[in-house]
Image (cartoon, helix red, strand yellow):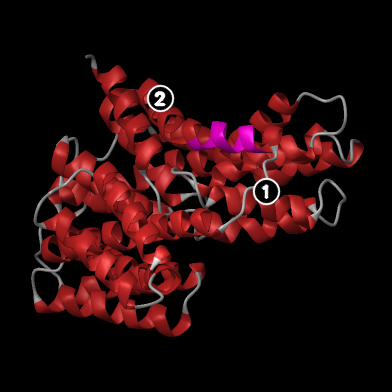
Amino acid sequence: MNKLRETFFTSLRLGLTSFGGPVAHLGYFERVYVKEKGWLTHEEYSHMVALCQLLPGPASSQVNFLVGLQRSGWPGALSSWAGFTLPSALLLYAFAVLAPKAHGPLLDAALHGLKLVAVAVVAQAVWGMAARLCPDRARTGIALAGLVFLLLFGGAFAQIAVILLGAAAGVRLCRGVSQASGSQLSAVSPKAAWAAFAVFGILLAGLPVLASFMPGGLVSLVDISYRSGALVFGGGHVVLPLLRDALVPSGMMTDGVFLAGYGAAQAVPGPLFTLSAYLGAAAAPAGASLAAWGAAALLFVFLPGMLTAIAGVPLWKWLAGHPAAQGALAGINAAVVGILGAALYDPVWTSAVLGKGDVAIAVTGFFLLEKWKIPPLLLVGFCLAASLVLKSL
């Protein structure tokens, strides 16, 4: 199997099995790309995560895109994005077409089981990354300070503040720490980076102008999708209010239709941004192509995040190889551990663990991953079965 095919099928496997949202996805990626495949070192991976945390857009999809870029070049970046994105996008598009109204206690229990999968996966990621990226008191202190800061203040912009404060603390506390292996991030030329940034800005400024001439049409949907992807920090759950406020008051869909899609998005693996495939199809007027509207919304909600990821790589690569930046990057890596630790508690733990039975399932799932090294798909099966049994008691 050549590199490009391997990149696609590995990403497709993740797209079919990665439940739990962006933080859980980062845990799955570390398990597969770093531990299983060895495509990245731990430091390279942590640098990708830190870079994408600073950028607007879906962080896990941006990381996956950059992994494909590093592994197989530009074709690998596109195939990696497609493999991770298409499974959930197609499922949500099918939901928009079929519009099933499935409800009931068994479905609720199954959805709850998927949330418990996320608890185990994120816990393992935090445990492993803390051991590698916080090996001394200084970096452990940076991680704990970031965790406490986020638990007290929260929010996507607080995450950016934690990364910046981690960099400042690393300059003072982590001098002499070597981060050289992180300098091997994907080579993106300055010309390509500037071109990506220019396209990002042109679309952000130009699409609203075009949409003003065709209100309620496909260009308006493209503009809404692109602006939502370009202006959101913090992942899929943060983009939802932007999409709702643009689509519902304008009359493109009702709140009931919007919320039905959001509920369905909780039951599928992969990035939550793929909800846009459902929203695009659901917003299509009578006689329009549902597939065209769904595809347009999907592509343009992801596009700004990919453009900013491309634009950010050269700067990050320079920082990772600059002696004066080594302490800052060590502090950033420790701050990322704090960010993941805070996310493990809220929203992952708080939304999934509602009683002693849930604690038992989540802890058992963690040990199944960490000690017995079971595949994530088996963990999904265990948590689903355990949640259904717990619901029947």
Which amino acid type is marked by label 2? Ser
Please tell me whether residue 238 is drawn above or below residue 212 in the rendered image.
below
Instruction: Tell me the number on the disc at residue 176.
Output: none
Dot 1, how many residues are within 10 Å of its Cα: few (below 14), some (14-19), or many (20+)? many
Answer whether residue 89 is magenta in the image.
yes
Q: Please state the horizontal and vertical placement of residue 78, each as a whole percent of the image.
A: 43, 26
Write down the quadrant of residue 29 in the picture.
top left
Residue drawn where x is 27% and y is 60% of the image: 120
Residue drawn where x is 13% and y is 57% of the image: 370
The quadrant in which the N terminus is found is top left
The residue nearer to you, when weighing 341 against 257, is 257
For label 2, the SS is helix
Please tell me whether residue 384 is drawn above or below residue 352 in the rendered image.
above
Is 132 situated left or right of 334 in this image? Answer: left
Residue drawn where x is 43% and y is 58% of the image: 54
Marks 1 and 2 sit apart, C-alpha to C-alpha, by 24 Å
- Mark 1 or 2, nearer chain start: 2
Q: Please state the horizontal and vertical placement of residue 95, each as a whole percent of the image.
A: 64, 38
User: Mark 1 or mark 2, which is nearer to you?
Assistant: 2
Residue beneath label 1, please? 227
Residue 135 is at least partly visible in this image:
yes
Which amino acid type is marked by label 1? Arg
Q: Please state the horizontal and vertical placement of residue 207, each as a whole percent of the image.
A: 75, 39
Is 256 situated left or right of 150 in this image? Answer: right
Our reading of the magenta stretch's main secondary structure is helix
Instruction: Tell me the number on the disc at residue 79.
Output: 2
The quadrant in which the C terminus is found is bottom left
Q: Where does the magenta region start and end? A: 88-95
Q: Which residue lies furthest to the bottom in this view?
A: 152
Q: Residue furthest top?
A: 1
Please give the count of numbered marks on the rendered protein.
2
